[in-house]
Image: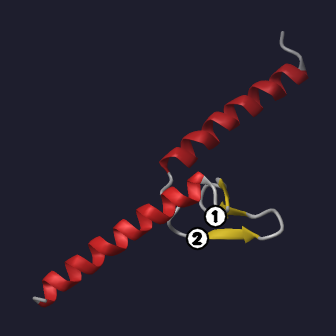
Amino acid sequence: MPTEEEIRAWVRDEQGKIDKEKQDACSHAQSGTLNSEKKIVTCDACDYVFELGGEDTQAIHAEMDEMQNRFLEGRSQRRGE
């Protein structure tokens, strides 16, 4: 029979897997919480932590710029510009 500590370790491991799946599926596009002292932003939807100026934030900025450009192009086309 597993000990209480083994069960707790298993639960932590399983929760970590669930959290990772949630973070992988999240687009991180809704909102985030800035912690300027630690220089991080935490996604409010999945608790993923972005280091300010890190590779993650650079990728998100590039993705957001691309989405904005597609939106603006679509709006221009609808207006006939």
Q: Is residue 11 above or below residue 52?
A: above
State the residue at coordinates (56%, 46%): 22
State the residue at coordinates (52%, 45%): 24
Q: Quadrant of residue 49?
A: bottom right
Q: Tell me the element at label 1.
A: loop
Nearest the camera: 16 or 10? 16
Quadrant including the C terminus: bottom left
x, y percentage for residue 40? 72, 62
Q: Quadrant of residue 66?
A: bottom left
Nearest the camera: 38 or 31? 38
Three-letter amino acid code of the residue under disc 2: Ser
Residue 31 badge: 2
Q: Is residue 5 above or below residue 33?
A: above
Three-letter amino acid code of the residue under disc 1: Asp
- Mark pair 2, 1: CA separation: 6 Å
State the residue at coordinates (51%, 53%): 26
Nearest the camera: 45 or 49? 49
Q: Residue furthest top?
A: 1
Nearest the camera: 47 or 75? 75
Residue 44 badge: 1
Image-based side of 58 in relation to 52, left or right: left
- First reached walking from the N terminus: tag 2 or tag 1: 2
Crowd band around label 2 with a 10 angstrom C-alpha radius: few (<14), some (14–19), many (20+): few
Residue 9 badge: none
x, y percentage for residue 68? 36, 74
For the residues labelled 2 and 1, say whether their Cβ atoms are less than 8 Å apart: yes
x, y percentage for residue 47? 67, 55
Q: Tell me the element at label 2.
A: loop
